[in-house]
Image (cartoon, coloured by chain):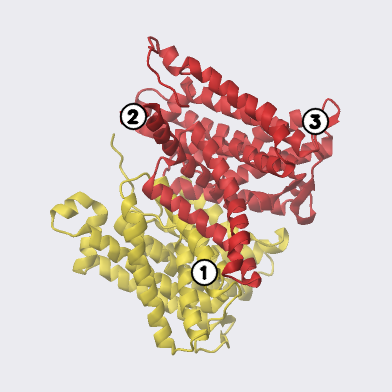
Amino acid sequence: MFHRESGVLKTTYEADMALYPLPIARWTVAAIAVLMFLVLPFLLHEYYLSLINLVSIAVVGALGLNILVGYTGQISIGHGAFMSVGAYTAANLVVRLGLPFWIALPAGGLMAAAVGAVVGIPSLRIKGLYLAIATLAGQLIIEWTINHVTWISGGVQASIQMPRPSLFGHEIATQTEMYFFLLFFVVLAVIGTMNLVRSRIGRAFIAIRDQDIAAEIIGIDIFRYKLLSFGISSFYAGVTGVLYTYYLGIANYEQFQINVSIDYLAMIIIGGLGSVLGSIFGAIFVTLLPIASRVFMEAFGGMIFSSQAMLNIIPNVRLILFGALIIVFLVVEPEGLNRLWRNIRSYFRVWPFAY
Amino acid sequence: MLDFDWQFFALLMSNGVLIGLMYSLIALGFVLVYKATDAINFAQGEFVMIAGFVVAVALGDYGVPLWLAVAAGLAAMISFGFGLERVVLRPLIGRPVVAVIMATIGLAAVLRGLGPILWGAETRALNLPISDEPFIWGPLFVPPIQLLGAAVSIVFLGAFGWFFLKSRKGIAMRAVADNQQVAMAMGINVERYFALAWSMAGVVSALGGIVWGSLLGVDTHLALEGFKVFPVVILGGLDSIPGAIVGGLVVGIVENVAAGYVDPYVGGGTKDFAPYLLMIVALMVRPYGIFGKAIIERV
């Protein structure tokens, strides 16, 4: 936020790595918490809460992918498939065994983590483009398997009805209740990621990203940490899949196809690689972009195009905007929205002076 | 295995070989760009789609003669490749590989959105003046369009193979691919060769668009053929033109044979994932493909 660091002197490494870098950060975090938990849910209309819910789900997934791509430097085009693994695992557990969500959710995450670690095995030998394509293969093979093995996918159209999650006998059904349910996991995921990346494991990830051979020479077991990164990232993805399934009330492989993997990659590129705040910005941006572009086109597109043509144009405008934004961010601002935010902040920090 | 149906097998094989050669044509565009500029083009399928659209629209809507439509397709794709290199890919030189991958994925999204807006969402026919009647040689049925596609592939694979091995420009391009700084020091205009490589990819995409478009019809699904490029180039090696042929043949044969024998038991779709399964196995054994060069890393 907009505050000055003067008078804060750090004398230990622990202080430098603390979650709250400055005393005032406690107050900003507290203010955001009050806003999110006490003000927003009672102020906003259900429709806007449903949008926030979609963003919440995306935040968890984007954080997971950022651990893998942004912090460990591995590429994955299989994030959507890992989400589907989590979703179908949880759906099967809930429907067949009647398990509650607090067992189904971590189980979905763990299953996705196991599958993710297997898909990540080639990362020991290959990197860059080859790894990207290997994970793309993982995506296609997982998609095919779920679609064709009726034991997993529940037969007709590969979809399973998912009952609502319930807490202490109370069913979470309305958008407002869903909002609190999802927000809890967002907070958990954010704190978890922030703690992970400042721990020994997180620093090993960053060392591998910066130069993996050098990391191996200073004693980091690359194989273990790369697989761990794939596992943790896929765990987040699996949890995202379960949350999305609970949100929609149905598990369907069409919600987790390759375009979803690309959406999540776009989130962390647009938001900022290797940054928790960037993942959140990116998730908000990419989730709201299609909605914003549709509202905009419905409002103003009618002036230029006929209503018949609009049916064709609206989804395609969304695609064009999406692709163009990825390119613009990569060319103009490679560090994404997070960097823009830092620039704004450092400008206002010394305002009204130049420096 | 008692009554092995040789006729069925031969049919699958011949179809696989012809389709495989047509895959090689698309893969060639990918290999050309990677060989010269180290850039990875995830939008290769969309290139082919756009080229198909241009030719189909020129033939269908404007009724121009075939040679003019083909020329228009070639010109459009050359200028497109040229402009793309200048605007999108040049600023990304020296950036991490994920940046280039994501930029071309973004480009793919733009093209897939642009095609239907400019030319409509319905499937267009791209009719070449050749007959639909398949040639029948013994057990084999060969549609003429596949034969044409395979022939075009072989001609261009040969031509580009010669270009890289013998011609002055091709040798310069190999030098650029090998080490950009040294190439610059030897007086090679690196940026011009980058533009040339993307234009050549444009030419190959235009041809791919014509043969694939007339085989499948032109709409956004044509871009999905781009997904077949990855197993082809991984199997063959990303920077190898002979590899593109071998990879294309292997993928074409494997997907046809797999689809012929496995599909009845699992209910379809084997065609799309069998090549990827094969690719993963190949990656575990030979990480740099059959003909690709191994990269030696230094810290």
| Residue bearing the label numbered 2 | A214
Between the residue at mark 1 and the residue at mark 3, the CA separation in whole angstroms equals 47 Å
> What residue is drawn where x is 37% and y is 16%?
A6
Instruction: Specify the quadrant of the image occupied by residue A7.
Output: top left
Residue B115 got which mark?
1
Helix, strand or loop for disc 1 = helix
Label 1 with label 3: CB-CB less than 8 Å: no
Helix, strand or loop for disc 2 = helix
Residue sticking out furthest to the right: A169
Q: Which chain is yellow?
A: B
| Residue bearing the label numbered 3 | A100
Give how far across and how far down residue A46 sits, in percent: 74, 41
Q: Quadrant of the N terminus of chain B?
A: bottom right
Q: Are marks 1 and 2 on the same chain?
A: no
Helix, strand or loop for disc 3 = loop
What is the display colour for chain A?
red
